[in-house]
Amino acid sequence: INLYEYEETAKDLLDEIEYDFIAGGATDEITIRRTREIYDSIMLRPRMLVDVGAVDIATTVLGQQIRMPIMLDPAGAHGRAHPEAELASVRAAGDAGTIMVVSSAASHTLEAIANEATGPVWFQQYLYRDDGITREMARRAEEAGYSAICVTLDSKVKPKRERNIRNNYVGPESPNY
């Protein structure tokens, strides 16, 4: 009935450790709380007797047209929640007419995900100490058909994720490395 029930359903369906990884955040989970507060503060203003027969919510993001103003961000390891993982996510993004930014830490190879794509895909690129690895990942993404590379700059500092520390969590390796 509402968005918060998805969270409760996920808690029932997933192992506790996987749920904690997905639901948890870094540094006392301050950003999670602030994001929820902001989300909860948004008020939708109903407009009665307005013709909605021709509503167009399409927009462009960095020159790429999408049918709705929502994108899938680069969240890694969707396989923690479902075996089809990013393969299902990229199909859903294409069906919705939007962009999926594929994480370097995906559960499937960036090539396999691109093969399933029915819409535009962008690739999340880390800057590795080894420039050769950085160039190799970018080359693979370009050859697979990704139309943009989104550079991630915050990976130099390992996040303090308290739920992971308590659970001694070690996530699955990504096949992309």
Image (cartoon, rainbow, N blue to C red):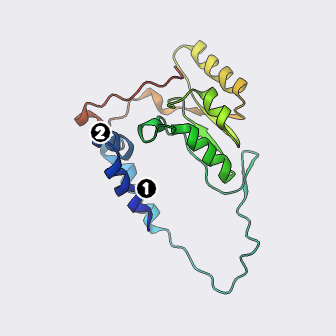
Along the line of sight, the residue nearer the viewer: 106 or 81: 81
Where's residue 93, x and y in %? 63, 47
**Amino acid on which the number 1 mark rests in the picture:** Thr
Tell me what residue is drawn at x 51 percent, y 73 percent: 43
Q: Is 35 displayed left or right of 111 in the figure?
A: left
Q: Is 131 displayed left or right of 173 in the figure?
A: right
**Amino acid on which the number 2 mark rests in the picture:** Ile
Q: Is 11 displayed left or right of 40 in the figure?
A: left
| Residue 98 makes an appearance in the image | no
Tell me what residue is drawn at x 61 percent, y 42 percent: 90
Where's residue 133, x and y in %? 57, 15
Q: Quadrant of residue 100?
A: top right
Residue 53, above or below 34: below
Q: Earlier in the sequence, mark 1 or mark 2?
A: 2
Quarter of the N terminus within the rendering: bottom left
Residue 134, above or below 77: above
Q: In which quarter of the image is residue 36?
A: bottom left
Q: What element carries label 1?
A: helix
Where's residue 109, x and y in %? 57, 26
Mark 1 vs mark 2, foreground winner is 2
Along the line of sight, the residue nearer the viewer: 141 or 160: 141
Where's residue 65, x and y in %? 75, 50
Tell me what residue is drawn at x 71 percent, y 76 percent: 52
Q: Is mark 2 on a helix, strand or loop?
A: helix
Residue that carries the numbered disc 2 in the rendered image:
17
Q: How far apart are marks 1 and 2 (CA)?
A: 23 Å
Tell me what residue is drawn at x 39 percent, y 61 percent: 5
Residue that carries the numbered disc 1 in the rendered image:
35
